[in-house]
Amino acid sequence: MRKTVMLTVALALAAATAQAYLGQVLGSYRSPAGSNTRGLARAVGILYVMNGNNRAAVYRVKPFTGSIFNWYLLPWTGQNSGLAFSTPSYLWVGRLDNDRVYRVDETSGAVYSFWGAGHDPYGLAPWCTGDGGTGTSYLFSTDDAPSRLYVHRLDNGSVVNSTSLTNSSRCDCAYDWRNNVIWRGRAGSIYGVAPSGAVVTSFNSPAWNPRGLAYYNRYLWVACNANGFIYRLDCPRGFSGVAPSSLGKVRAIFR
C-alpha cells in the first residue's frame, strides 16, 4: 500500500513538472529587426515587429516561426518606440521625437490619424477585453522619466488616468487581459504591473534588455536586444503553473 501511495504521488508530481509555468520559454527565433527591436504587437496569425531606425520598418511575421510575410517602412523619419494592435486592422506607433502616437494601416503603414501623447510613448498596449486588441477602449502608454503609466482615449489621446511606476524602463509593454496585468521589461527581468501601477509579479527575462513585448492567447512574446531573439513565453491565467523550483521533488520521495 505504501509503495502504491508513493507511486501515485510521484506520478502526480511528474505530471505537474511537465506543466508550463509563468515565464517558461516555449520557443524562440531571431528577430527580423535584430538587436534593434523597439516594439511588438500581436493579431490573429501575425506578429508585428518594429525596429528602432529613424525610418522604422515594420515586419509582419508568423508568430510561432518568425517567417516573414512582408514588411514596409513607416512614412516618416523619427525616433520610434512602442507598438500596439487594435481591431479591426490598426497599428498604434509611438514616436519619441514629437511625443505623438500614430494610427496606421497594419498592412502598409499608411497613416490614418495621430494625436499628442504629452510624454515619450516608449511602450504602447491596447486596454482590451480579448486577444488581438478585441474590445479595445483605451490605450496604455508608458514613459521613462518620470516612470509613469498613462491611459489614453483612442480617438483624441486625452489622458484619462496616470500613475507612477516603480521601475524605470524604455521598453515596449503588453497588456494581459486574462490577468489584468501590464507586462514591462527592464534589464534582465519582466515585471507584471497592475493598472494601479503596483508590481504584482516578476520573473527572469530569457535574455538581457527585453525591449519589445506582445500578449496573445496566454503567450507573451518578448524581443531581447542583447542577442536579437524573440521568445515565446508561457503566461497562464492566474500564474498557476509549476515553477522550476518544483523540479527534483519526485526524486526526493524515493530517498
Image (spheres, rainbow, N blue to C red):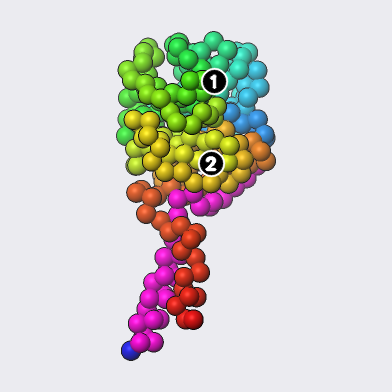
Q: Is residue 231 left or right of residue 126?
A: right
Residue 34 percent coordinates (x, y)? 67, 35
Q: Is residue 233 above or below residue 85?
A: below
Q: From where the camera sits, is residue 121 visible?
A: no
Q: Which residue reaches farthest bottom?
A: 1
Q: Is residue 218 left or right of residue 74?
A: left
Element under disc 2: strand
Q: Is residue 147 above or below residue 43?
A: above
In the picture, the disc for residue 109 is: 1
| Foreground residue among 69 and 32 | 32
Residue topped by disc 2? 189
Residue 192 percent coordinates (x, y)? 43, 39
Q: Which residue reaches farthest front?
A: 166
Stretch in magenta: 2-31
Residue 59 percent coordinates (x, y)? 59, 31
Q: From where the camera sits, is residue 160 visible?
A: yes
Identify which amino acid the numbered label 1 is placed on.
Gly
Which residue is depicted at the point 36% across and 48% down?
Answer: 237
Does the stretch in magenta take in 21? yes
Give the class, few, some or many, for how many residues have Cα within 10 Å of label 1's Cα (few <14, many ≥20).
many
User: What is the spatial separation of the Cα atoms under label 1 and label 2, in whole angstroms?
Assistant: 31 Å
Q: Is residue 41 above or below residue 29?
A: above
Q: Is residue 253 above or below residue 96?
A: below
Q: Which badge, 1 or 2, comes first in the chain's sequence?
A: 1
| Foreground residue among 245 and 178 | 245
Identify which amino acid the numbered label 2 is placed on.
Ser
The quadrant of the picture occupied by the N terminus is bottom left
| Foreground residue among 200 and 151 | 200
Q: Is residue 130 left or right of residue 57?
A: left
